[in-house]
Image (spheres, grey):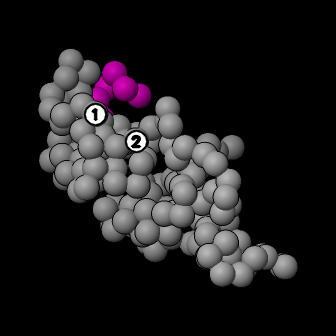
């Protein structure tokens, strides 16, 4: 059995997953658009991502765009958490994800981790980035 987060975007899925692959030094994401489906729409509606995933840290981050005209708030009240082996690695990932994003909790030491931070990236995805510690597993 496995559990994989599935996040949604308003037309930014492909560039978001490409960015995440770059940040985490992961293989390029696998992407299928709505236009690739049998009888799928063409034009802007067909260019949106129907399903995609990127392999990060031994897991899959799955994602799609909402269909054109479908309302939805990308990643509201949801965070993707990444646990890293060192404070330096956690800080590096936090800083990269912060490019064009917003701080929710500044990166620094906390009572439960030597390095912890929260942010919303430029695509609207909320991240919790931290150095793994004994109490978190």
Quarter holding the N terminus is top right
Instruction: Provide the residue span drawn in magenta.
Output: 130-137
Callout 2: SS:
strand
Q: Residue 134 lies in magenta, yes or no?
A: yes
Residue found at the far top of this picture: 111
On screen, residue 68 versus residue 80, left or right, reads right
For the residues bearing labels 2 and 1, Cβ distance under 8 angstroms: yes
Circle 2 residues within 10 Å: few <14, some 14–19, many ≥20: many
Magenta stretch encompasses residue 106: no
Residue 53 visible to an observer of this rendering: no
Percent of width and height locating residue 69: 67, 58
Q: Which mark is residue 104?
A: 1
Cα distance in 3D space between marks 2 and 1: 9 Å
> Compared with residue 100, is residue 83 higher up or lower down, i.e. above or below?
above
Q: Residue at x 34, y 21 (%)?
A: 135
Apparent side of residue 76 relative to residue 118 in the rendered image (left or right): right
* Label 1 residue SS: strand
Q: How many marks?
A: 2
Q: Earlier in the sequence, mark 2 or mark 1?
A: 1
Vertical order, 88 against 48 (above or below): above
Which residue is pictured at 23% across the width and 27% down the height? 113
Task: Residue lying at the far right in this picture: please name it.
Answer: 39
Residue 80: name its quadrant. Answer: top left
Q: Splitting the image into 4 quarters, where does residue 26 fall?
A: bottom left
Q: Residue at x 24, y 39 (%)?
A: 103
> Which residue is the site of mark 2?
126
Q: Is residue 52 visible?
A: yes
Q: Position of residue 70 (x, y in %)?
A: 68, 53
* Image coordinates for residue 71, horizontal then vertical, percent: 64, 48
Q: Position of residue 124 (x, y in %)?
A: 42, 48
User: What residue is shown at x 34% (from left), y 43% (from top)?
Assistant: 120
């Amino acid at each position: 059995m496995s559990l994989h987060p599935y996040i949604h975007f308003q037309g930014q899925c492909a560039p978001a997953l490409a960015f995440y692959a770059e940040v985490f030094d992961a293989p390029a994401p696998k992407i299928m658009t709505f236009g690739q489906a049998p009888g799928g729409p063409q034009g802007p509606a067909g260019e949106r991502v129907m399903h995609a995933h990127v392999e990060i840290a031994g897991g899959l981050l799955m994602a799609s765009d909402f269909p054109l005209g479908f309302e939805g708030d990308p990643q509201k009240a949801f965070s993707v958490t990444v646990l890293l082996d060192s404070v330096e690695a956690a800080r590096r990932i936090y800083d990269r994800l912060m490019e064009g994003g917003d701080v929710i909790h500044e990166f620094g030491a906390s009572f439960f981790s030597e390095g912890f931070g929260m942010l919303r990236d430029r695509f609207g995805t909320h991240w919790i980035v931290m150095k793994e510690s004994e109490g978190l597993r």
